[in-house]
Image (tube, rainbow, N blue to C red):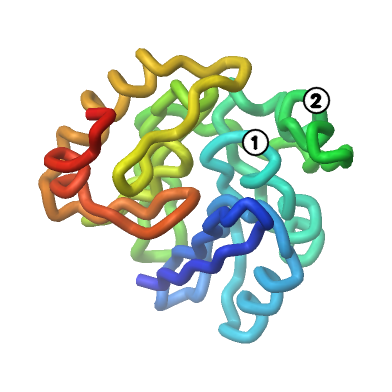
Amino acid sequence: MILTGLEISSMGENCYIVGCEETREVAVIDPGGNPRAIVNLLEENNFKAVYIINTHGHIDHIGGNKEVKEATGAKILIHEADAKMLTSSAANFSFLFGSKIVSPPADQFIKDGDVVKIGNTVELLVIHTPGHSPGGICLKTGNIIFVGDTLFQGSIGRTDFPGGSHKQLIRMIKEKLLCYDDDVVCYPGHGPATTIGFERKHNPFL
């Protein structure tokens, strides 16, 4: 499996590229900024981006959508509950930083239980985990989960934005993430990777 990541926004957001070694087809997860670096990485490695998947609609996770889509033709996938954030600078909070950044609209909505297939070998299971945002999702393949801003090493996503819910986020983490084995690796939207086991034992919010 192809798996690489890069920190690409001023807010330290992690973008991940995951895909099929046989076909070189990949998904770009959360291109939040610096789209040129993302496109360069794709081109240098002969990766063909077929999907851009946003784990949620905040600006630091969608800021590079437009440029990456224009360069690759990849389809934008997001949960319907966050879809309006793509095309509204007020909804995605970019206006708070003095800019009005928007994305092209979604090409396809994804929901809990969907499976996104990439090439011949990779399948991403969509896990809907609202709380940080109404349409927040995680993506599981094999022994790893891309957790967006749902869960961090030793912390959780903030819930003070419109549409956020601390109670709901905690419930989603416990019901939909902590059900997995301790050795499952979590790749968050910010900060270092962690494991389900580490968070189960050491995360003060859980």
Q: Position of residue 191 (x, y in %)?
A: 44, 55
Residue at left 46%, top 28%? Answer: 111
Residue at left 41%, top 77%? Answer: 22
Name the residue type under label 1. His
Q: Position of residue 87 (x, y in %)?
A: 80, 32
**Is 168 above or below relative to 7?**
above
CA neighbours of label 2 inside 10 A, class few (<14), some (14 to 19), many (20+) = some
**Is 196 above or below relative to 192?**
above
Left or right for 156, reference 43: left
Which is more toward the observer, 151 or 35? 151
**Is 45 above or below relative to 9?**
below
Q: Give the image quarter of residue 192.
A: bottom left
Residue at disc 1, secondary structure? loop
Which residue is denoted by mark 2 in the rendering?
Answer: 90
Q: Give the image quarter of residue 3.
A: bottom left
Residue at disc 2, secondary structure? helix
Please report whichever mark, 1 or 2, sits nearer to the chain's N-terminal start. Answer: 1
Left or right for 201, reference 115: left
Which disc is residue 58 wearing? Answer: 1
Name the residue type under label 2. Ala
Q: Position of residue 160 (x, y in %)?
A: 55, 20
Residue at left 21%, top 43%? Answer: 199
Which disc is residue 198 wearing? Answer: none
Q: Residue furthest front?
A: 204
Which is more toward the observer, 126 or 153? 153
Left or right for 33, reference 112: right
